[in-house]
Image (cartoon, rainbow, N blue to C red):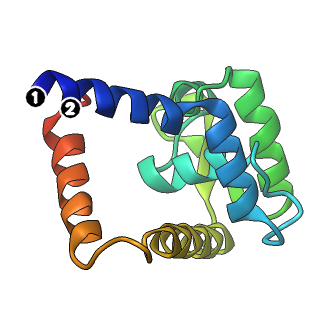
Amino acid sequence: MQNEAGGEIADSLGVLLRRATRIQLYKTLTADVDEALDELTYPVLSAVARIGPRSAADLASEVGLDRSGVTRHASRLEQAGLLCREPDPFDRRATLLVLTEPGARVVDELRRRLAAHITASLTTWPPGEAQTFARGLRRFVTEGPFT
């Protein structure tokens, strides 16, 4: 029974982690938010919000891009006022990508949109099942193979 559950979870995670799945979700979330924000720039903005100021090189592995891709997307977000660059206090040659106040507001809005999108998809679930799933998923993420 445990092996079956493990395989079922692995298959479901495969669908969730597919690049095409993520891109479609990001397109939905970023629609009509800001011209600079789309399925390509969203992961950069979201990562800076989640982990804090980072260099483009450090952020690259977090978002699955190379440094030049992060830099290109960050430049669009910077021009829109959602990110800014600040000197790295530990390396005078480097700069950090930092979330601005407007960027933080956009991230808050996108997180609300994501929560609403997920909530809407759970409306047909039996009472209590979504909460049980949420608790199980949190436990899986904090105790499972990703730790």
Q: Residue type at mark 2? A: Ala
Does residue 142 appear left or right of residue 99 in this picture? left
Q: Where is residue 106 in the image (x, y as percent from the top left)?
A: 65, 71
Q: Which corner quadrant holds the C terminus? A: top left
Q: Where is residue 136 in the image (x, y as percent from the top left)?
A: 18, 53
Residue labelled with disc 2: 5
User: Is 145 situated above or below 102?
Assistant: above
Q: Is residue 82 visible?
A: no
Does residue 121 appear left or right of residue 64 in this picture? left
10 Å crowding of disc 1: few (<14), some (14-19), many (20+): few
Q: Residue type at mark 1? A: Met
Q: Can residue 19 be seen in this view?
A: yes
Spatial CA span between label 2 and label 1: 6 Å
User: Is 105 situated above or below 9?
Assistant: below
Residue labelled with disc 1: 1
Residue at x 64% of width, y 31% of height: 19
User: Is 94 situated above or below 30?
Assistant: above
Does residue 6 appear left or right of residue 69 in this picture? left
> Secondary structure under badge 2?
helix
Are the two marked residues, 2 and 1, in contact with CB atoms closer than 8 angstroms?
yes
Residue at x 69% of width, y 35% of height: 20
Q: Where is residue 31 in the image (x, y as percent from the top left)?
A: 80, 66
> Secondary structure under badge 1?
loop
